[in-house]
Amino acid sequence: MPLPIYRLRRLLGLTAVVLTAMVLGMYFYARMRVRDVRKEVPGKLGYEISKTAHGFRISKSDGKRTLFTVEAGEVKEFKLNDRAELHNVNIILYGRDSSRYDQVYGDDFAYDPRTGEVTAQGDVQIDLAGNPSGLQSADQSVPKELKNPIHLKTRDLVFNRDTGNATTDAKVEFSTPQASGWAVGVKYAGKSNTLTLVSQIHIALSGARAAVIEAERGVMTGDPREIVLARAHLDRERGRVDADQAVFYLDSDNSLQRVVAMGNVTAQTRPAAEKGSAADPPAETRVRAHQADFLLSDRQNLLRTATLTGNVHIEQSGPEPIAGDAGRVVLDFGGRNEVKKVHALDGARLVQKAEETKKAGTSSTAQDFELTAPQIDFTVRPGNILERAMTQGDARITITPAQEPAAPSTQTGQKTVVTAGSFEGIFAAGKRKNHLSSIHGFPNARVVYSSPGVPDRVSESGAGAVVCGPDGGVVAVDQGNGVHYDDGLPPDKRTQAWASIAHYTPADQMLKLIGTPSVQIGSMLTRANTIRINRATGEAVAEGDVKTTYSDVKEQPNGALLASASPIHVTAQRMTSQKTPGVALYSGKARLWQDANVIEAPSILFDRDRRSVTAHGTASDPVQTILVQAEKAQADKNKTSTGKNVPGTPTPAASSPIAITANQLAYADSERRAHYETGVLAKGADFSASAKTMDVYLVPRSQTASQPQNRQPVMGSFSGPGQLDRMVALGDVVIQQPNRRAEGQKLVYTASEDKFVLTGGPPSIFDAERGKITGGSLTFFRRDDRVLVEGEASSPVVTQTRVAH
């Protein structure tokens, strides 16, 4: 904030000169008057006395230049007590180097030789002015120009000839073109050249930056040239500064060069409220330190630097409070006392709180954050608006959830720590001044997410950025130039991620990965266009061209469809991985396969550890699986070209695929059973079977792996499709073959015998050549024309023979 130090400099510097000159003037005047009245003057001391038109004139010189002159209209001496009186006195002091033109004048002065005291009876007026060109001018000439003269007024001033001391208990008033003020009681010590303002020091600065300086007591010394104010206060419309003690250091011409405030130094700014902002009062800034040291430039009385030391604390109140701490703070000034740079040193700390939302039903999603570093350098725009902040040394940002004071935190102990080689903070422009909008960290940005009871989650990258929201606090953490994330869990449960860019939002604890991202959870590796990881729940969501591979798969001899040791692959448009390791939901053209076994569906829920699948589809986009049926080898039968069986000619074993579709599928490899529901359709090479539900049982891998038709002589090699053992269909069963159609309510198909057993309904079979047959149970075989019919009392066998015309 701009400080009106240049005005203070002039005022206090000139005040020192005035009061010092006043006392010295009285001293010279007293000694001159006593000796003149008693006829002891000219010879010994070199005074020169001459008559004037208004009385007489006394002057003192050093042989070259006049030191002072005294003019009096009347002199009276009282013989009884040797007292003397001077009336209408005017004293001009030129100084030993002729650099002054100070005047002391009053109506009545009295001298008592017994006590050695000279007393001003009534008012004493003092005008102080510098005369830098005095040596170049004629002796005793009036200066061509008097710059910023100071006028003082007091009364009853008492000067002692023997001690050189002067005192008054009266009020001392002073004024300049820039300021006016007063103090009550003055004491001057001649031997030490010390002037003490006893009490109630009050200085009012005028002009555009009006302010008031008050102090309980003040001391001015000549060697060293300084002014010390006790319990000093500076108050103005936009702020206040307080200190236990303020020391003003003067140069040889009494110009202020340095000000040091010590002990409980505090400063407070009060920005003017904007129109229409009564409900949102302007923020106040408070500064606290043990000591403040202000250095002024040699020209124009402007501040050069200000140094605050000793537990420096700065805070800004308002809806989005911000606070800072440091061992030392250095402010660089430029122009018209405008702060240009701020250097926070010796352990700097910057804290910004998210805006506290008090309205019912609302809450802020922003987070509180704290920036610490050995040094933070700030640049400031005109108007005391922070522009940038740059850290030096090992810096870190700590992000914690913002909570209402009365509400217990549901995220107690959670925090996010961001570190980097250095941070650069950008402050927002516009209505909300001094509000951090983002902090960029580089190189080697590292984000550590901590929660009680779980390992730290770490995200590393080449660069990072902390993004602040309009309500204050942190709303996001971005990382770029290659990102690696690790949740620190044991290897079988650990989540790791890689991407070009990462975007983290602390409010929902979501980490979003962009740019060829990949996530590995245990032995599950997923790639997609974008991947999001919830660090609180452990859930991962991948979207766009999802590809997942499950490695480290152990062989299960008693399993079937997903029983080999080969990797399991899944593709989809979207994947959601649950917190439970190995459980993931795939949606959007999902396809899961291991070796030659394939499951396709709009959505697939896969449990890696249980080797189970739950798939869902629709009538237009059903679940689909491909199985195989091993053809029965005919060791003693084979058909010739004439259609006759030739004994003793073996037929090589073969397999044929069976595709099964339905709206739902549930499969558990440990049971080797696939359960299909709603719109079930199984299609083989020469038949199809539809039903409401169907259970398909598969042959164990331990049996299929050694079959020559699968070319698997040893366990653990490439696995062919799951091999059908039997299937059981229920509800509106329909079996279609090229030359016949069968209907019933329950079907049991045994692959090893190629046998269909149809019951319920009652079952019926229609043959294009033989007609329709109905009975309690129908048994027929897939590759021949045999049909076994069994009847019951309630459902006798009925044969309807088709007659050709």
Image: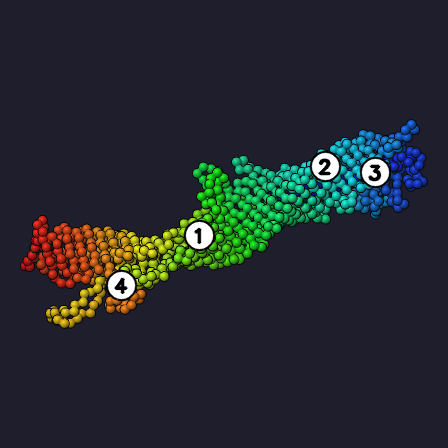
**In the structure shown, which secondary structural element does the residue marked by tag 1 occupy?**
strand
- Between tags 1 and 4, which lies in front? 4
Report the disc number at residue 774: none
Residue of label 4:
702
Residue of label 2:
217
Measured Cα–Cα span from mark 4 to mark 2: 102 Å
Instruction: Identify the residue at the far top of this view.
Output: 80
- Between tags 4 and 3, which lies in front? 4
Type of the residue with mark 3: Gly
Mark 4 surroundings: few (<14), some (14-19) or many (≥20) residues within 10 A:
some
Measured Cα–Cα span from mark 4 to mark 3: 120 Å
Q: Is residue 33 left or right of residue 622?
A: right
Q: Earlier in the sequence, mark 4 or mark 3?
A: 3
Looking at the rendered image, the quarter that the N terminus falls into is top right
Q: Residue at x 60, y 52 (%)?
A: 375
Residue of label 3:
164
Type of the residue with mark 4: Ser
- Between tags 4 and 2, which lies in front? 4
Q: Earlier in the sequence, mark 1 or mark 2?
A: 2
Residue of label 1:
511
Q: Earlier in the sequence, mark 3 or mark 1?
A: 3
Type of the residue with mark 2: Arg
Whole-percent x, y for residue 391 in the image: 57, 53
Whole-percent x, y for residue 546 in the image: 37, 57
Whole-percent x, y for residue 519 in the image: 41, 57
Q: Is residue 307 left or right of residue 472?
A: right
**In the structure shown, which secondary structural element does the residue marked by tag 4 occupy?**
helix
Q: Quadrant of residue 651?
A: bottom left
Using the image as rendered, state which of residue 196 and residue 684 is in the foreground. 196
Measured Cα–Cα span from mark 3 to mark 2: 22 Å
